[in-house]
Image (cartoon, rainbow, N blue to C red):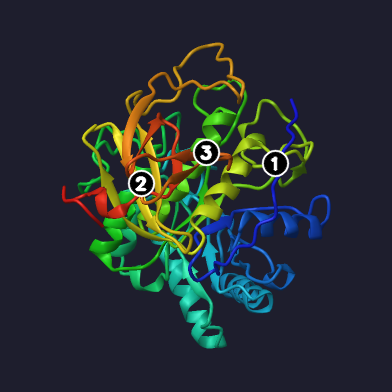
């Protein structure tokens, strides 16, 4: 399969200060300028790592690096390594340094095998490094570089609480989270978004929205710092029920970013721009799922989730979250945003549940043009004018006529973006009419 896509020109007005759109990684393919132009069209404002000077105007690169956690570091070796990394940040114009990666999954003697989740096995060592970084910053004067936590694999509440317990919370300028997700919709398992929610024992660990809400709850409890999602995902590993199908991936990109904006996330960095891996760029290995996390296929054609990234970036350009919309049908969900283009509603219905695919061997991935949502729910909505504009997950627009101040849209599990509704006639989370 290959894909053909046409993206009309679009100018974004957001800046890194007000945009949540980022990428965790990209490569200069076919050239650096080609990659830069594509990121411009996508609305990318943040990169997890790189040189800010290489970026087109309006995009900022942070710095990310890791160490060998099994190595015995002398004080001199540690300080020298820290100085080198801080110097890179200053020279590359990186305002934030995300030090370490997913170390809650490992011990010093175990590679990334998942044996450490929930045990905080490297917490003491990690905090010692944080303190050393802060000391070296003071000694060298490179205090302008702000520290993000390591990218936490899943919402590992034990490790986050341990950082606070060890007195290192005030060393961080942001909490970095990697909310991995299985074959669930991004809003799983929060069945009532209007109430507070935290992850409970027995909930599936690899979920998105529950992880984000739990992280924000911990941040409010331990001291307010921004939440960064430095890796978010919609991997399209073929013939795997645990991953997204190409169609689900597009739907889930839209909902992932909409929920992140609603929850006050500072930035959500999609992992990554291209399929394949950094040490085998545009290579192929059907036995390694890491080769299928990108937005662009190995033949450089756009996957459906890239179109979805563009669509939701356009929709949320300079947007602010207004609130949740309530409906008489308890399965119907809605987010309302204020934008320079007018009120934006993002609507979907969970009549078919939160689980996207059934575990089966072999699992055949459906084609992206096949709609797998079974339940279609006609939903009457108040319109502010004679028409409303409906935008699907890959950015296709439809004008729907309204009659007598009302329009009926058919909703299913795919989020639908809508301009032209009347916020004063929608029901807010308190059960009252009007926003």
Q: Which mark is residue 383?
A: 2
Q: Which residue is mark 3?
A: 392
- Where residue 219 appears, x then y in whole percent? 30, 61
Q: Residue at x 69, y 53 (%)?
A: 26
Q: Nearer the viewer, residue 63 or 318?
A: 318
Closer mark to the observer between disc 1 and disc 3: 3
What residue is shown at x 32% (from left), y 42% (from top)?
404
Earlier in the chain: of badge 2 and badge 3, it is: 2
- Disc 1 designates what residue? 296
Measured from the top left, where is residue 261 in percent x and y? 41, 56
Question: Would residue 363 be visible to someone looking at this image?
Answer: yes
Q: Report whether 374 appears left or right of 237.
A: left
How far across and down, in percent of the image, does residue 380 sit? 31, 35
In this view, the mark in front (2 or 3): 2
| Disc 1 versus disc 2: nearer the observer | 2
* 143, above or below 21, in the image: below
Q: Residues within 10 Å of mark 2 (few under 14, many from 20)?
A: many
Give the quarter of the figure containing the C terminus. Answer: bottom left
Using the rendered view, name the quadrant where residue 358 is placed. top left
Q: Residues within 10 Å of mark 3 (few under 14, many from 20)?
A: many
Tag 2's secondary structure? loop
């Amino acid at each position: 399969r290959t894909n053909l896509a046409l993206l009309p020109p679009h100018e974004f007005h957001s800046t890194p200060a007000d945009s949540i759109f980022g990428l965790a990684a990209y490569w200069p393919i076919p050239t650096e300028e080609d990659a830069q132009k594509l990121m411009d069209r996508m609305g990318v404002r943040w990169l997890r790592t790189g040189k800010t000077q290489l970026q087109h105007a309006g995009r900022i690169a942070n710095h990310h690096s890791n160490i060998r956690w099994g190595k015995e570091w002398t004080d001199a070796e540690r300080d020298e390594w820290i100085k080198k990394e801080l110097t890179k940040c200053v020279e590359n114009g990186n305002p934030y340094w995300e030090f370490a990666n997913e170390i809650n999954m490992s011990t010093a003697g175990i590679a990334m095998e998942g044996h450490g989740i929930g045990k905080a096995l490297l917490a003491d060592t990690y905090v010692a490094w944080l303190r050393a970084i802060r000391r070296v910053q003071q000694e060298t004067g490179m205090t302008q570089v702000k520290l993000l936590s390591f990218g936490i694999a899943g919402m590992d509440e034990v490790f986050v609480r341990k950082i606070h317990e060890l007195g290192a919370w005030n060393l961080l300028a942001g909490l970095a989270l990697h909310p991995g997700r299985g074959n669930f919709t991004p809003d799983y398992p929060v069945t009532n978004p209007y109430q507070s929610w935290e992850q409970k024992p027995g909930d599936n660990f690899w979920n998105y929205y529950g992880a984000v809400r739990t992280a924000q709850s911990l941040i409010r409890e331990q001291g307010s710092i921004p939440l960064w999602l430095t890796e978010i995902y919609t991997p399209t590993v073929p013939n795997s029920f645990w991953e997204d199908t190409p169609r689900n991936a597009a739907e889930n990109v839209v909902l992932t970013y909409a929920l992140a904006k609603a929850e006050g996330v500072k930035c959500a960095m999609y992992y990554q721009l291209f399929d394949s891996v950094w040490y085998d760029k545009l290579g192929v290995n059907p036995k390694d799922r890491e080769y299928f996390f990108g937005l662009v296929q190995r033949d450089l054609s756009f996957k459906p989730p890239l179109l979805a990234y563009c669509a939701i970036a356009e929709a949320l350009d300079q947007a602010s979250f207004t609130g949740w919309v309530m409906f008489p049908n308890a399965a119907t969900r809605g987010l309302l945003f204020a934008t320079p283009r007018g009120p934006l509603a993002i609507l979907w219905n969970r009549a078919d549940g939160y689980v996207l695919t059934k575990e089966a061997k072999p699992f055949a991935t459906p084609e992206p043009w096949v709609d797998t949502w079974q339940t279609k729910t006609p939903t009457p909505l108040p319109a502010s004018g004679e028409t409303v504009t409906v935008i699907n997950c890959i950015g296709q627009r439809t004008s729907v006529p309204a009659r007598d101040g009302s329009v009926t849209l058919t909703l299913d599990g795919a989020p639908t973006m809508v301009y032209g509704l009347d916020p004063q006639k929608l029901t807010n989370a308190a059960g009252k009419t009007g926003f």
